[in-house]
Image (cartoon, rainbow, N blue to C red):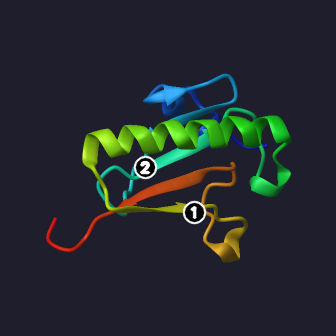
């Protein structure tokens, strides 16, 4: 396997929160203010290759990340996105979930 971006300490070192199974970073190319990525520590190419413990770690952090964004940015809604495979828009082949805050026009 070639060097995986999300397996590198450079990305994980920017974590704003983590648990034993996953971590959260701001997206480098955000679709909106506060766009976060939830990334399992264990390498898997896409969500369907993750094991139940990693899924638990991801969803636990998803809840914590939502609370963080609620307090920091007060968004009006969220998109939760998992792209699985190149044709689905996946660009980095290490499982990651996008938590994208959405805001009403004019906010």
x 85%, y 42%: residue? 51
Looking at the rendered structure, the secondary structure element under dot 1 is: strand
Residue 50 higher or lower than 11, as above or below: below
**Mark earlier in primary sequence (1, 2):** 2
The C terminus, quarter of image: bottom left
x 28%, y 50%: residue? 74
The reply, left or right, for residue 28 in relation to residue 38 is left
Closest to the observer, 3 or 84:
84
Density class for disc 1 (Cα within 10 Å; few <14, some 14-19, many ≥20) is: few
User: For the image shown, how many numbered marks are present on the structure?
Assistant: 2
Q: Find the residue positioned furthest to the top.
A: 20
Where in the figure is residue 26, as x and y percent of width and height?
Answer: 41, 43
Residue identified by numbered label 1: 81
Residue identified by numbered label 2: 27
Residue 8 higher or lower than 97, as above or below: above
Closest to the observer, 3 or 47:
47
Q: Quadrant of residue 41?
A: top right
Looking at the rendered structure, the secondary structure element under dot 2 is: loop
The reply, left or right, for residue 81 in relation to residue 28 is right
* Label drawn at residue 28: none
x 20%, y 74%: residue? 105
Where in the figure is residue 64, as x and y percent of width and height?
Answer: 50, 36
Question: Distance from label 1 to label 2 (Cα)?
Answer: 13 Å
Where in the figure is residue 11, as x and y percent of width and height?
Answer: 50, 34
The N terminus, quarter of image: top right
x 71%, y 65%: residue? 84
Residue 81 higher or lower than 44, as above or below: below
Mark 1 vs 2: CB contact within 8 A? no
The reply, left or right, for residue 67 in relation to residue 53 is left
Where in the figure is residue 47, as x and y percent of width and height?
Answer: 75, 54
């Amino acid at each position: 396997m070639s060097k995986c971006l999300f397996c590198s300490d450079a990305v994980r070192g920017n974590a704003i929160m983590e648990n034993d199974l996953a971590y959260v970073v701001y997206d480098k190319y955000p679709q909106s203010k506060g766009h976060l990525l939830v990334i399992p520590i264990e390498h898997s190419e896409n969500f369907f290759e993750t094991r139940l413990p990693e899924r638990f770690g991801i969803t636990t952090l998803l809840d914590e990340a939502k609370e963080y964004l609620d307090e920091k940015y007060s968004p009006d809604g969220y998109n939760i996105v998992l792209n699985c495979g190149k044709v689905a828009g996946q660009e980095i082949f290490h499982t990651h979930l996008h938590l994208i805050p959405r805001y009403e026009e004019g906010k």
